[in-house]
Image: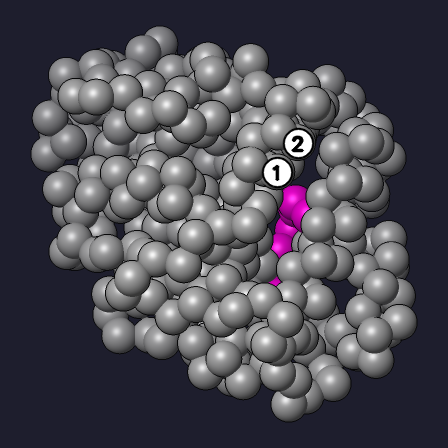
Amino acid sequence: MKKLAHPIVSPTRRRLLRGAGLAATAFGATASGLLLPGHAALAQGSGTRNTDTVRIGFGRGGLPLVARERGEFEKTLAAQGIKAQWVGPFPNHAPSLQAVVGGSADFGFWGSTTPALAAIIAGSPLVFTQFTVYTPRTTAIIVRKDSGINSVKELVGKKVAVNRSGLGEFLLVAALEKHGVDRKLVEFVYLNPPDAAPAFGQGRVHAWAMWSPGVDIAREQYDGKNIFFEETDLDFQIDYSSLVTLRKFAVENSALVRAVINAWHAEREWANAHPREYELLAQKEGKYSDTVRDQLIAHHRQYRFYEADDPNFLREFQRAADWLAQRKILPQRITVADHVVRV
């Protein structure tokens, strides 16, 4: 298989590209984008705006939480006559998407692309307006140290908590495949994070596939350890973070959508430059220990943004979507370029 020359192909290459100069080069080379056939693309400069209020979903971590705590995001939009309203918090991306489809939010938070694809396949008129890749990738499969489980192969006959069609499920599938374990020999227990945490702590499941900061909190709270870590053990990235809205909203409010995206760019730049301050704000909301906070600070997480129609990004995203469909995490194949809007 031909190796694709793109900065998100492998964890090793991602580590090499963490430098701000390289990241800027990678982003700058694609910032103008390409209007691909088969998807709705809106020319920049021809924006429309039919509302002065935008409702934005947020979760319990990541850029939306920090943006909400800082307050600069709202000020950036207010300077353009746009009122930002926060909707949430959501435990994971799926209910955030439901809020968008149901009309109680205009944007989901920067959540997993996989449940968004699942919702689109099911008929939801959602579109991707922007993507982000963060490094390092800290999603992990953890077990309790007293569980007697020391490897992925030892999950045979065990129960593993995952979120359906999300980061947890795909990571477990990839881990089992990499280690030659038939997934039918492992029991997938579909739980959202608020329910998965006590299930893991009480021993009702033997392992949990989860992202930061939940996985970091659980390792400390329940004396857990990694048996599979995305950044070092996953061969290529399968899931990304995305800013999702309804197609109708994007078409009718393209200028507003662009203003929101630009405000997120400002948050990204601040977060990349201030990792300690970023994690202090996240800790304030998450109410976890200083030990967990310091571990997260040490990651020095960096975000890179990609326009919705970036051809190199879409090539990698399509590869990931095909992988998910082939393994029945997604019910069928989907052409991702048909569901992006560039404003």
Q: How far apart are marks 2 and 1 (CA)?
A: 6 Å
Q: Residue 28 shows which numbered tag?
A: 1
Provide the secondary structure element on which disc 2 rests. helix
The range drawn in magenta is 57-63
Callout 2–callout 1 Cβ contact below 8 Å: yes
Q: In which quarter of the image is residue 295?
A: top right
Quadrant that contains the C terminus: bottom right
Residue 265 is situated, as x and y percent measured from the top left of the image, at: 71, 50
Q: Looking at the image, which residue is at 88% across and 66% down?
A: 75
The amino acid type, in three-letter code, at marker 2 is Ala
Residue 79 is situated, as x and y percent measured from the top left of the image, at: 89, 71
Residue at the far bottom in the pictured view:
50
327 in magenta: no
Quadrant that contains the N terminus: top left
Residue 6 is situated, as x and y percent measured from the top left of the image, at: 42, 28
The amino acid type, in three-letter code, at marker 1 is Gly
Quick one: 18 or 159, which is closer to the camera?
18
Q: Quadrant of residue 107?
A: bottom right
* Observer able to see residue 192: no
Q: Is residue 45 left or right of residue 246?
A: right
Would you place residue 14 above or below residue 325 in this image? above
Provide the secondary structure element on which disc 1 rests. helix
Q: Residue 24 shows which numbered tag?
A: 2
